[in-house]
Amino acid sequence: MISKVKICGLTCKKDVEAAVKYGASYLGFIVEAESSRKLSVAEVSKIAFTGNGSCQTVAVVVDPTNDLLENIIKKMRPSYIQLHGNESIERTSFIKNNFKTKIIKAVSINSKKDFITSEQYTGLVDIMLYDSRPPSDSPQRGGHGQSFDWSMISHVPLPKTWALAGGLNVSNVENAVNLTKAPILDVSSGLELTAGLKDHNKIKAFMDKIKNG
């Protein structure tokens, strides 16, 4: 099995083009959320369309309002909404049913108990995303370049479709795939030159390791 890749935190057209060129399956954009990679809905709408339809687009939001979701869906038309905040099961259900959109739900992992807690979303969300817990003093929910203990994954129940995030990079991606067998890998800061700007050589190297691993 070759893992699919979501390249997240994209902020400019040239990086989107590089992600598409080297084989990413998902393109992630941080929309109106606390992040050094934050974009407005208008900014994302200008760069999110790949033209050839080879990639699915993901709008990453944190505890979004209904107005923001309406604006995103109208102007960006994403393949998925990624909920990366403290969205409850009730709020997640409301968003899925009222906005008729596919949902990725991010869950912060620190122990095996967090996997158990995340099971409440099974059957409701389309992709469960397991990410490392952010530093307690950071308002930014992802993109910190920190991993959680991947060995936990072999000892917990997992949904059919899930993604691994947190600290992935060119140096550790082979180990991540071998250890977790993750169907989807979500990478952001590990492929950057600086926050928000990708290193195209790193993108190519990351994708090559997955394809040839």
Image: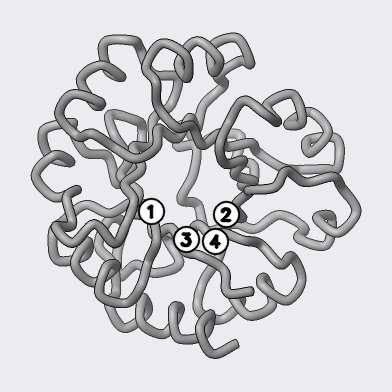
- The answer to whether the residue labelled 1 contacts the one labelled 3, judged by CB atoms less than 8 Å apart, is yes
- The answer to whether the residue labelled 2 contacts the one labelled 1, judged by CB atoms less than 8 Å apart, is yes
Q: Nearer the viewer, residue 59 or 38?
A: 59
Which residue is disc 1 drawn over?
8
Question: What's the amino acid at mark 3?
Answer: Val
Q: What distance separates the C-alpha of mark 2 from that of mark 3?
A: 6 Å
For marks 2 and 1, the one nearer the N-term is: 1
- The answer to whether the residue labelled 2 contacts the one labelled 3, judged by CB atoms less than 8 Å apart, is yes
Question: Where 51 falls versus 91 (above or below)?
Answer: below
Q: Which mark is residue 185?
A: 4
Assign the N terminus to one quadrant of the image.
bottom right
Q: Which mark is residue 187?
A: 3
- The answer to whether the residue labelled 3 contacts the one labelled 4, judged by CB atoms less than 8 Å apart, is yes
Q: What distance separates the C-alpha of mark 3 from that of mark 4?
A: 6 Å
Q: Is residue 24 left or right of residue 129?
A: left
* Label 4 vs label 2, nearer the camera: 4
Q: Secondary structure at mark 4?
A: strand
Question: What's the amino acid at mark 4?
Answer: Leu
Which residue is disc 2 drawn over?
165
- Residue 207: name its quadrant: bottom left
Q: What distance separates the C-alpha of mark 4 from that of mark 1?
A: 10 Å
For marks 2 and 3, the one nearer the N-term is: 2
- Binning the other alpha carbons within 10 Å of mark 2 as few (below 14), some (14 to 19) or many (20 upward) gives many
